[in-house]
Image (cartoon, rainbow, N blue to C red):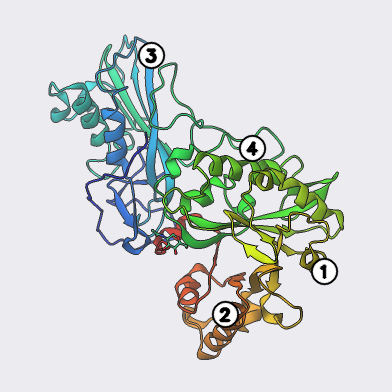
């Protein structure tokens, strides 16, 4: 199910200048929604990975044995969601994120034709097998690289209305997935709707369909302030291939809640990070990325409250991952890497972490101070990363988006010092993501990212 590995390659190769606002391109289609997607399959990651476009998502829908040849009841629906690459109207080879195309056929009883068959191009009227007909209608939406409905003042969006007592076809994309079990599976009860996202303390979002992540290859990126920058914590970062993710935590009533400036009550570290990560690991038979089972993953917990109990509450919240033996830890005086390494930063207490005081599992590590590496005895038994604010570490502005020789020298020296201690390097507060490639070339291990879509251009880890 959900196998998108055997594509024939028809990558869009038009070069498009990326403007700030979403720009419709000949490689994009919105099906009248706000969400633009690539029409064709696309290579991303500088040629190291690929994603599915609109047309192959349509193929999967129309060729599914649940859909092809099925009878849609009068006033009934047949819906399915499948993967597609959402590019925001920009060049999909360098910008975009995995999303979902929801396709629906509806058999409506139409007594008076409003948007009738006159909208159909001749070729869609041919008598075809059901699958071919379905593809023909839906692909007509993208055939001119623009939204059919918009052109025709059809407010329904992404719709082909075929005629009196006939079937109409819809295709709309969204970054928010339908429910967890809705991937590449037909539903007949009603139109498949998208989940709502609650960023307050309300009910949880259903997990992203796990199988949609099967083909994602990891990239050396850290999802910075993941819970606030991304609409959907954890899942959006994983769909981009991030190997690290960040949650800021505050002590609230003996538990830790996440939040940037203040805690979002009810959004606990356990509910929004620990439980989803464990569910993914369980589903994938013990790896975060199915496409690379040896790739390690970091959960950066940035302590926003100074109270001593914050660490105790973090240790407690991690328990489901610990019980399943997914956490990296120190065993017999040696670092043992497991699927998830917990890195504590911000106001986390180094003195306690370095002695595992209150951490009986010895499974929380420190984010060492990259520009002050000699201040403490940072090593692989107490730390995992070494980080610094970019401007402070590299001293000054980056002119014309190029690091100066002086800045390059500083970064090289910092990277070497951290690597000599066995620690991975990350800079935060970057001047812009244009700096990623330059930092990578200098040996920086984790690139700080706020916009997950921008990571599409980075080569995957291999
Ligand atoms: C998987 O990830 C590891 C660790 O980052 C890397 O060394 C390896 O090359 C990757 N394997 C593949 C097949 O890409």
The residue under label 1 is: 351
Q: Where does the C terminus fall, quadrant-wise?
A: bottom left
**How far is disc 1 from disc 2 in space, using C-alphas?**
24 Å
Tell me where residue 33 appears, x and y as whole percent.
41, 38
Which element is circle 2 on? helix
Q: Return the residue nearer the eye: 313 or 62.
A: 313
Q: Helix or strand or loop: what does disc 4 sit on? A: loop
Q: Nearer the viewer, residue 35 or 278?
A: 278
Determine the residue positioned at 31% across, 41% down: 54
The response on whether ligand 1 sits within 8 Å of label 4 is: no
Give the label, 1 or 4, closer to the camera: 1
Select label 2 or label 3 by which is in front: 2
The relative height of residue 296 versus residue 370 in the rendered view (above or below) is above
Query: How many neighbours does mark 1 have within 10 angstroms: few (below 14), some (14-19), or many (20 or more)?
Result: few
Spatial separation of the CA atoms under disc 3 and disc 1: 64 Å
Q: Are marks 2 and 4 in contact (CB under 8 Å)?
A: no
The residue labelled by disc 3 is 76
Identify the disc placed on residue 415: 2
Cα–Cα gap, marks 2 and 3 = 61 Å
**Residue 213, position as x, y percentages in the image:** 45, 44
Q: Secondary structure at mark 3?
A: strand
Furthest-front residue in this view: 332
Separation (CA) of disc 1 from disc 4: 37 Å
Q: Earlier in the sequence, mark 3 or mark 4?
A: 3
**Residue carrying label 4:** 198
């Amino acid at each position: 199910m959900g196998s998108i590995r055997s594509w024939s390659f028809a990558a869009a190769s038009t070069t498009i200048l990326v403007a700030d606002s979403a720009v419709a391109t000949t490689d994009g289609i919105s099906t009248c929604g706000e969400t633009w997607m690539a029409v064709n399959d696309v290579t991303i990651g500088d040629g190291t990975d690929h994603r599915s476009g609109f047309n192959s998502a349509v193929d999967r829908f129309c060729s599914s044995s649940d859909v092809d040849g099925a009878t849609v009841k009068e006033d009934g629906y047949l819906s399915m969601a499948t993967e597609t690459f959402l590019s925001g109207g920009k060049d999909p080879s360098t910008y975009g994120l995995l999303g979902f195309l929801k396709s629906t056929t509806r058999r409506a009883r139409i007594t008076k034709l409003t948007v009738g068959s006159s909208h159909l191009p001749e070729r869609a009227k041919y008598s075809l097998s059901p699958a071919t007909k379905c593809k023909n209608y839906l692909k007509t939406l993208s055939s001119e690289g623009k939204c059919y409905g918009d052109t025709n003042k059809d407010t329904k969006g992404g719709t082909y209305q075929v005629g009196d007592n006939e079937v109409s076809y819809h295709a709309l994309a969204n970054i928010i997935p339908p429910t967890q079990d809705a991937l590449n599976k037909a539903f007949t009860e009603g139109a498949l709707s998208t989940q709502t996202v609650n960023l307050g303390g309300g009910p949880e979002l259903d997990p992203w369909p796990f199988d949609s992540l099967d083909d994602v290859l990891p990239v050396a990126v850290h999802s910075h302030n993941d819970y606030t920058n991304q609409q959907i914590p954890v899942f959006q970062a994983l769909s981009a291939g991030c190997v690290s993710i960040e949650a800021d935590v505050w002590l609230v009533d003996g538990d830790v809640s996440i939040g940037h400036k203040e805690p979002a009550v009810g959004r606990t570290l356990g509910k929004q990070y620990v439980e989803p990560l464990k569910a993914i690991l369980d589903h994938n038979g013990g790896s975060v990325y199915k496409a690379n089972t040896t790739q390690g993953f970091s959960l950066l917990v940035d302590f926003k409250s100074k109270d001593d109990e914050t660490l105790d509450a973090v240790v407690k919240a991690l328990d489901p991952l610990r019980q399943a033996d997914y956490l990296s830890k120190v065993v017999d005086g040696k670092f043992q890497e497991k699927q998830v390494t917990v890195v504590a930063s911000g106001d986390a207490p180094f003195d306690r972490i370095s002695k595992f005081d209150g951490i009986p599992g010895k499974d929380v590590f420190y984010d060492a101070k990259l520009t002050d590496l000699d201040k403490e005895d940072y090593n692989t038994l107490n730390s995992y990363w070494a980080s610094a604010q970019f401007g402070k570490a590299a001293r000054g502005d980056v002119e014309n988006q190029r690091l100066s020789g002086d800045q390059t020298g500083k970064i090289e020296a910092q990277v070497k010092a951290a690597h000599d201690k066995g620690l991975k390097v990350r800079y935060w507060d970057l001047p812009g993501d244009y700096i990623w490639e330059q930092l990578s070339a200098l040996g920086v291990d984790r690139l700080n990212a706020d916009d997950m879509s921008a990571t599409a251009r980075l080569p995957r880890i291999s």
